[in-house]
Image (cartoon, rainbow, N blue to C red):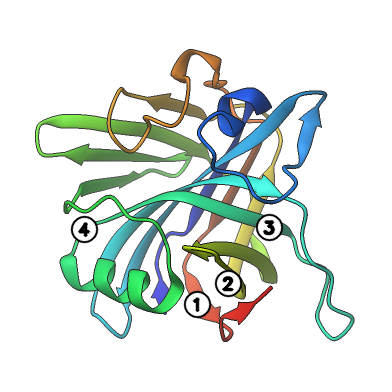
Amino acid sequence: MASRTPWKHSSKCPRATLEKSSLIHLQPLEVQHQRSILAVTAFQFTESMVGAYDEVVLSVIVHPMIDPSRPLPKAAFFPFQVGVTTASSRRHAIERWHLPHYMTDLQMEFVRTEEELAISVRDGSAPVLDVVVTHFPPEPARVLFNAFTMNDEERYRVNIFLDGPHGEHEEETGSLTLYPHAMTEPLTLDDVSQVPFREHWFHGGIQTFEELGRI
């Protein structure tokens, strides 16, 4: 898939908030004792097997699986909610990757300036979330991520590579606002930090999936 603006925002979230929703079957990574990491990732896919679409993913950061034949993963995700802007992209991701989706088309707006990227996610007239990621000089990168999914009792892992100009920092200059909505219902919103401790921004690039494997 070719992507114009992959973006990730990592916020602190109490571990109990995540576990009470039965979302975790893997070991969450703790940035502090009893504080897990919520990752909010947004994409603008300009090319894919199902055409152009936008996507937002809410995930818990978990421990990666190390493979001697692969680079060390940058991070590992357990997505618990995915939202997209087209029905065809939703069907494809559910069938191929077993990703849990919000079943209504969302509306996403990406507003970019020289200093920041503001992303707004809406479900009709209802707000879902607003995020702002701030600029950091990008450098060419090829980054590996693990993603873990489930289908009933089956558990899976897929390796995802992102190639492109990549900026990353921990300046805590971005922001995250989550609104009451079905997508954010598993979270206790008041417990989630509105200030990220880490921001990633791929200024265009390509996302490549390896084959889904059972674990």
Name the image quarter holding residue 98.
bottom left
Which comes before the other along the chain, label 3 or label 1? 3
Q: CA distance from mark 3 to mark 4?
A: 24 Å
Position of 100 compared to 49: left or right? Answer: right
Q: Amino acid at mark 3?
A: Ala
Can see residue 14?
A: no
- Please name the residue that numbered disc 1 is placed on: 206
Considering depth in this image, is 24 or 189 the residue closer to the camera? 24
- In the shown orientation, is residue 95 left or right of residue 206? left
Q: Are marks 2 and 1 in contact (CB under 8 Å)?
A: yes
Q: How far is mark 1 from mark 4, CA to CA?
A: 19 Å
**Mark 2 and mark 1: Cα distance apart in space:** 7 Å
User: Label 1: few (<14), some or many (≥20) within 10 Å?
Assistant: some
Residue receiving disc 2: 164
Q: Is residue 85 visible?
A: yes
- Determine which quarter of the picture holds residue 129: top left
The circle drawn on residue 85 is: 4
Amino acid type assigned to the residue bearing label 2 in the image = Gly
Q: Residue at x 69, y 69 (%)?
A: 143
Which amino acid lies under the numbered mark 1 shown in the image of this protein? Ile
Q: Is residue 58 above or below residue 210?
A: above
Label located before the other in sequence (3 or 4): 3
**Location of mark 3 (residue):** 76
